[in-house]
Image (tube, rainbow, N blue to C red):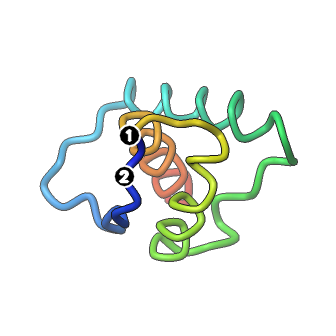
């Protein structure tokens, strides 16, 4: 079940692979794009995305792993 605990906005020492980010992009496009236009990742900072993701992930029925992949993808897309 989805946890309502806020995700941290900083990845810290976690290694994020290109494969992980690619999976996050697919989930983002397929799950989030079902209900509305996809937001531009640069429209919000990493901390704002924590709140947005915590609000939207349950609606999109994302599990914890998918939630983290989408968050990591969105934040990385800003760079």
Give the number of marks: 2
Residue 61 location in percent, x, y?
59, 36
Residue depicted at 42% across the width and 45% down the height:
2
Residue 3's disc is 2
Q: Secondary structure at mark 1?
A: helix
Q: Secondary structure at mark 2?
A: loop
* Image location of residue 13, percent across then percent down: 13, 55
In the rendered image, the residue lying farthest to the left is 13
Residue at 79% x, 38% y is 33
Find the residue positioned furthest to the front: 1
Task: Tell me the quadrant of the picture where the N terminus can be found.
Answer: top left
* Residues at marks 1 and 2 touching, judged by CB atoms closer than 8 Å: yes
* Residue 5: quadrant of the picture: bottom left
Disc 2: CA contacts within 10 A as few (<14), some (14-19) or many (>=20): few
Q: Is residue 41 left or right of residue 21?
A: right
Q: Nearer the viewer, residue 61 or 25?
A: 61
Q: CA distance from mark 1 to mark 2?
A: 7 Å
Q: Quadrant of residue 20?
A: top left
Residue 66: image location, x then y, percent: 45, 34
Which mark is in front, 1 or 2? 2
Q: Position of residue 34 (x, y in %)?
A: 81, 34
Tell me the residue at 59%/65% (across/down).
52
In the image, residue 20 sits, relative to residue 64, either above or below, namely above
Depth order, front residue of 62/43: 62
- Circle 1 Cα neighbour tier, 10 Å, few/some/many (<14 / 14–19 / ≥20): some
Q: Is residue 38 left or right of residue 27?
A: right
Above or below, comparing residue 27 to residue 6 in the picture: above
Eyeballing the image, is 77 above or below 21?
A: below
Front in this rendered view, residue 2 or 51: 2
Report the residue marked by disc 1: 64
Q: Which mark is residue 36?
A: none
Residue drawn at x 42%, y 48% as measured from the top left: 72
């Amino acid at each position: 079940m989805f946890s309502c605990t806020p995700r941290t906005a900083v990845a810290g020492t976690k290694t994020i692979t290109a494969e992980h980010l690619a999976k996050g992009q697919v989930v983002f496009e397929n799950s989030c794009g079902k209900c509305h236009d996809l937001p531009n990742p640069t429209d919000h900072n990493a901390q704002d995305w924590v709140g947005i993701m915590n609000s939207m992930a349950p609606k999109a029925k994302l599990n914890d792993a998918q939630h983290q992949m989408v968050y990591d993808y969105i934040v990385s897309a800003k760079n």
